[in-house]
Amino acid sequence: MNRGIALLCLGMSAGALANPMQNEYVELSVVVDRTNNSFQLACTPKRAHSEMPKDWVQDCNRLGRQVLDLAVDSGMAIEIPAEPFGEAGRFVTEIPLEAADNIKPERLLSPAYGE
C-alpha cells in the first residue's frame, strides 16, 4: 500500500504540471496517513463561501475522481465513488450562499481510502 501511495504522489506531481489539481475556486491535495496506510482528499476553497459558485463542491468531486483514477492506475485497489467528498460535500452545498458572507470553509475532507 505504501508503494501505491508513493506512486500516486509521483503521478500527481508529474500530472500537476500538465493538469493542475485546482481551478479558479478550489485546490485539491492528498493527506497521507502512513500509520493506517491510507489517504484522504482535501479540497480547499479559495474564496469566501458567498463568492463561490453554487456547484463548487462538484469541482471538488471532479478533481477528487481524477486523483482516485490515478490511484487505481498506479495499482491501488480502491472504489471510486461518484462523489468522493460524500456527506461533507452535500452538507456544504446546503448552506445558503447569501447567509455566509464572512464564512470561508477551511477544507472538505473525503473519507479515507486505502487499507
Image: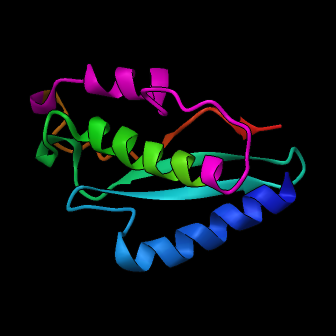
Q: Give 24 or 75, whichever is nearer the viewer.
A: 75
Tell me: residue 49, above or below residue 82.
below
Quick one: which residue is furthest to the left in this view? 98
The residue depicted at 65 percent of the width and 61 percent of the height is: 8
Farthest residue, direction right = 35
**91 or 80, which is in the foreground?**
80
Q: Which residue range is magenta in the image?
A: 71-98
Image position, residue 78 (x, y; %):
68, 35
Instruction: Write down the quadrant of residue 109 in the picture.
Output: top right
**Res. 107 in view:** no
Count of residue discs? 0
Which x, y percent locates residue 112? 68, 36
Q: Magenta span has 93?
A: yes
Q: Is residue 90 left or right of residue 87?
A: left
Where residue 3 appears, x then y in whole percent?
83, 62
- Picture layout, residue 96 above or below residue 43: above
Q: Assess whether residue 41 is covered by the magenta stretch.
A: no
- The residue at the point 52 percent across, 78 percent down is 14
**Foreground: 66 or 50?**
66
Residue drawn at point x = 46 percent, y = 45 percent: 64
Give the quarter of the image for residue 40: top right
